[in-house]
Image (spheres, grey):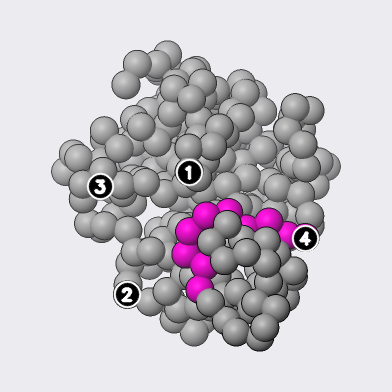
């Protein structure tokens, strides 16, 4: 993966950040196509669980289903980390989202983070960031994008600076995210009752009318143990949404 590799980032060497965060490897770039692509390359190496790739700018950042993720220089935290384990459970994105929400709240004051199924981070009605989990073979990585400063070109978005009144250094937030990911088990056949309760408390779509690509109109009724969104259709029947976009009405 080509990119402008940095020896120092945010006032410290990558070796110093590696030690501070307790991870096996840190790569920092001034600009790179996609941190997820580079992390997938690293994921094949032994001992690289929680290796971190960070960029000040992504030129080919992406969201779900190939959507463009705007990652301009100096505006946010654009990072990817190698997840432990051999393959992602269907709900791994939700678990990563919970960990990131906890990390943001621990690192800031007065900011409450909600989750929009399956991968968006919200504050109120505005998008703060997102998670993109991808796999190649047995390797799994989590791409995490968080708006730190306001970006005028992104509609219906917010930033941590806007919500908290302070600019949080990206290096501080990375440390909180890595710690939160380490605390949270990311594998398992189903989401347990405690996790489902956490998701329910943060679910910005809960009981809201929505339009889904997969099943059309209905009311969002939470997330089930498999990580699917439960949709109640106008006739009262319920179906599981497992793919496509969901738009609140």
Q: Nearer the viewer, residue 182 or 195?
A: 195
Mark toward the start of the polypeptide (2 vs 1) = 1
Residue in the picture at 39% in, 43% down: 81
Q: Which label is found at residue 139? A: 3
**Few, some or many residues within 10 Å of mark 1 (<14, 14–19, 20+):** few
Q: Is residue 107 above or below residue 166?
A: below
Task: For mark 1, give the secondary structure.
Answer: helix
Residue visible at 77% across and 60% down in the picture: 249
Q: Is residue 242 magenta?
A: yes
For the magenta stretch, what is the residue range? 240-249
Q: Which mark sits nearer the N-terminus, 2 or 3?
A: 3
Q: Quadrant of residue 47?
A: top left
Quarter where residue 248 is shown: bottom right
- Look at the numbered disc 2 and give the secondary structure of its residue: loop
Give the Cα separation between the discs numbered 2 and 4.
Answer: 32 Å
Q: Going by the image, does 34 lie left or right of 109?
A: left
Return the mark for residue 65. 1
The one nearer the camera, 221 or 81, is: 221
In the picture of the structure, the residue carrying the numbered disc 2 is 189
- Name the residue beneath numbered marker 4: 249
Which is closer to the viewer, label 4 or label 3? 4
């Amino acid at each position: 993966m080509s990119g402008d590799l940095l020896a120092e980032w945010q006032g410290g060497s990558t070796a110093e950040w590696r030690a501070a965060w307790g991870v096996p490897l840190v790569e920092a770039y001034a600009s790179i196509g996609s941190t997820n692509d580079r992390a997938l390359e690293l994921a094949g190496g032994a001992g690289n669980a929680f290796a971190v790739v960070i960029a000040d700018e992504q030129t080919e950042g992406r969201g779900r289903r190939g959507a463009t993720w705007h990652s301009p220089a100096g505006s946010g935290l654009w990072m990817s980390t190698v997840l432990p384990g051999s393959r992602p459970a269907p709900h791994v994105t939700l678990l990563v989202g919970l960990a990131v929400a906890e990390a943001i709240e621990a690192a800031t004051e007065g900011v409450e983070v909600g989750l929009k199924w399956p991968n968006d981070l919200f504050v109120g009605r505005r998008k703060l960031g997102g998670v993109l989990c991808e796999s190649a073979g047995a390797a799994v990585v989590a791409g995490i994008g968080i708006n730190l400063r306001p970006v005028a070109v992104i509609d219906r978005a917010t930033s941590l600076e806007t919500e908290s009144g302070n600019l949080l250094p990206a290096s501080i937030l990375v440390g909180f995210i890595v710690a939160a990911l380490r605390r949270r088990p990311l594998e398992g056949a189903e989401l347990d009752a405690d996790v489902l309760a956490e998701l329910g408390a943060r679910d910005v779509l809960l009981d809201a009318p929505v339009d889904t690509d997969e099943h059309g109109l209905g009311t969002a009724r939470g997330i089930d143990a498999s990580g699917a969104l439960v949709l109640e259709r106008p006739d009262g029947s319920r179906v599981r949404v497992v793919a496509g976009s969901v738009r609140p009405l």
